[in-house]
Amino acid sequence: MLLVLLAPVAGYGEDFTLAIVVPLKGEIRYINFDSADHEPTFHVVLTNTSGKDLRIWESWNSWGYFNLSFELTREDGKMVVVERGPHMWTMNGTTYWMMKPGDLHIFDVWFPDDWSDLPNAAKKAEAVKLRAVFSSPASKDSEKLGVWSGTVKSPEVAVTLQDMR
């Protein structure tokens, strides 16, 4: 069973909704750290809820690579921001995706892959709350090319991190 939670936020929230999609396994949503199976660990869905075409940066380039991040809240209440780690580009360009009204963009996420500040699950399960953040800062390039800028956050989702490597 797949459950998608959507919630707009103030400001640019009327343009997009953002959701984390982690299938239930029994009663728990597991995010397994297992690079051996070559499957995404979970997905993040960005939906154009506006009545207009919107552009977002493609995630292969330096304008879009860092736009998706996560707020991870541990059981003790401490929050960790999980972001993409450093990356070297051999090729780079201002390319974007066009999203029509109602279009979905699905980000496949592999943990741990190239994400920094992930808690060490150390072969044991850790229950956390996870929120996705899609943030695209305004720049001369975004203004020139009409690429959306702003921030949208998903609702928190209770998940269990587990290192299966």
Image: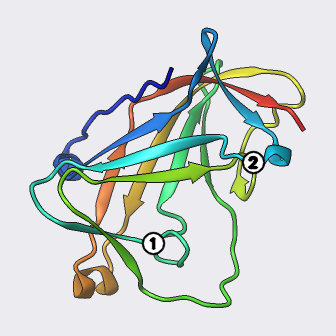
* Percent of width and height locating residue 165: 90, 38
Q: In the rendered image, which residue does mark 1 sit on?
A: 58
* Percent of width and height locating residue 129: 55, 26
Residue at 27 percent across and 54 percent down: it is: 103
Above-or-below relation of 15 to 91: above
Q: Residues within 10 Å of mark 2 (few under 14, many from 20)?
A: some
* Percent of width and height locating residue 54: 22, 66
Residue at 55 percent across and 88 percent down: it is: 92
Mark 1 and mark 2: Cα distance apart in space: 21 Å
Above-or-below relation of 55 to 111: below
Residue at 21 percent across and 61 percent down: it is: 100
Residue type highlighted by circle 1 = Glu
Residue type highlighted by circle 2 = Pro
* Percent of width and height locating residue 125: 78, 21
Residue at 49 percent across and 34 percent down: it is: 21
Single out the mark in the foreground, 1 or 2. 1
Label ID, residue 112: 2
